Amino acid sequence: MMTVKDFETAARRRLDPVHADFIAGGAADEITVRANEEAFRRLRLLPRVLRGSAERSLDITVLGGRARTPVLLSPTAFHKLCDGEGELATARAAAAAGAIMIVSMASTVAVEDIAEAIRGSGEDGAPAPLWFQLYLQPDLDFTRTLVRRATDAGCGALVVTVDSPVRGAHERDLRNGFLDLPDGLRCAHMAEPGEGGRVRQIAMSPEISWQHIDWLRGITSLPILLKGALHPEDALLAVRHGVDGLLLSNHGGRQLDTVPATIELLPEIHAAVAGRIPIVLDGGVRRGTDVVKALALGASAVGIGRPVMWALAEGGEKGVRRLLELLRDEVDQALALCGATGVRDLTPDLVRAPVWPDTAGYAVRPGGAVS
Ligand SMILES: Cc1cc2nc3c(=O)[nH]c(=O)nc-3n(C[C@H](O)[C@H](O)[C@H](O)COP(=O)(O)O)c2cc1C
Ligand SMILES: O=C(O)C(=O)c1ccccc1
């Protein structure tokens, strides 16, 4: 396994095709799924030379969380579809790599058990942080309980997904009839306590509004990241509502199809928040050079979704370890070739974009410069 692509190919061979489609698929025509990767490919790196970059560090600190790599694990549902150990395997691999892992609300292992599995396993006895992803539920008492569970388990931040007032139209799943988890698997956070307890469905609720963010702000002192706000006006509103960070994400093209690639939106969002809160970006990150481009354009870290699922399917905990290691090596090599010693040296002038409008008819503006 030398590249992320190798994991994708290997996972396809191992997974039930219905599950492979669930992972790879997106909404409707999957235009945004493809756009995320294509947009990274269109950008070009313009390196500096002779800057003496022998000593390099990939360490980052974001929202008080320290990690040994700028690549974090975006929240993805149902890891037990890929490996019997599910999220326990993923979390062990993330801890070994010093990577931040965002536990999905739709995980097949409970956050308490995930936290327990990595306790004391980091290099200095402290693994990189776990964050918890939340779909705000109209049942606020239930939501409050989940927030408390994540907090008590030691999670360092809450990631609130706001791009899902309704579920995206996953046409592959509809055609395949993949509507529910196989027997024996369940969403650990949605089960009522006790054997044979009722398992709730995660509600995607169109009634969720900024008032709910204010409510959440009032019940927790954990940092809150908003995941899935794409419009610069919403980024500004996030700052005004006391949100601590943005996870700039189009859900890997799984919600509204035809939204822009996240890397194309980054300069605009970066300009809008003007350094007041950190931005993490996900969507289409497959190479170390993608990571470097996103960091250069203002992201504090990047997330990966599908690659983690593929690596888990290919080789369980070991697979995810290898994935994180290879991405780390690629980022390190790209840093060296850019004449950078760390994330701080990555600046927007290192990224060049076509100046002509792309086929969608809008211009890419690296660094937020108005063209
Ligand atoms: C199989 C799968 C499950 C996902 N589950 C969740 C989820 O439970 N919550 C969430 O906020 N995002 C979820 N996402 C979106 C990811 O967090 C992330 O935004 C996206 O996968 C990033 O794009 P990438 O797959 O191109 O790296 C999921 C994505 C995939 C592929
Ligand atoms: O598939 C997804 O992208 C996703 O976010 C999700 C949410 C809840 C359950 C399963 C998947």
Image (cartoon, grey):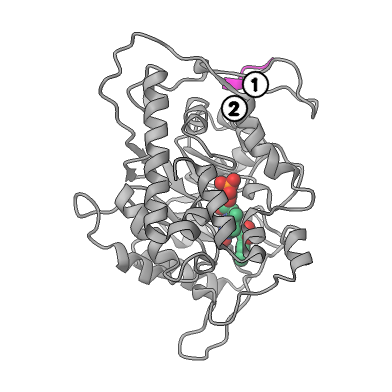
- Res. 370 image quadrant: top right
Residue 202 visible in image: yes
Q: Position of residue 62 (x, y in %)?
A: 39, 41
User: Where does residue 313 sit, x and y in percent of width and height?
Assistant: 50, 60
Which percent across, then down, holds residue 77? 55, 63
Kind of residue at badge 2: Pro
Is 40 on the left-hand or right-hand side of 356? Answer: left
User: Of label 2 and label 1, which has the lower sequence position?
Assistant: 2
Tell me the quarter of the picture where residue 42 sits.
Answer: top right
Residue at position x 38%, y 59% in the image: 317
Label 2: state its secondary structure: helix
Name the one closer to the observer, 310 or 133.
Answer: 310
- Tell me if residue 226 comes above or below residue 103 in the rendering: above
Depicted 245 relative to depicted 371: above or below = below
Q: Which residue is mark 2?
A: 267
Residue 140 higher or lower than 287, as above or below: below
Which disc is residue 174 wearing? Answer: none
Residue type at tag 1 = Arg
Q: Residues within 10 Å of mark 2 (few under 14, many from 20)?
A: many
Which of the numbered marks, if any, corresponds to residue 365?
Answer: 1
At 30% from the left and 62% from the top, the residue drawn is 118
Q: Residue at x 66, y 52 (%)?
A: 163
Residue at (48%, 70%) from the top-left corner? 146
**Distance from label 2 to label 1 (Cα)?**
7 Å
* Residue interval drawn in magenta: 366-371
Q: Secondary structure at mark 1?
A: loop
Whether residue 121 is in magenta: the answer is no
Asked if labels 1 and 2 touch by Cβ distance under 8 angstroms, the answer is yes
Quadrant containing the C terminus is top right
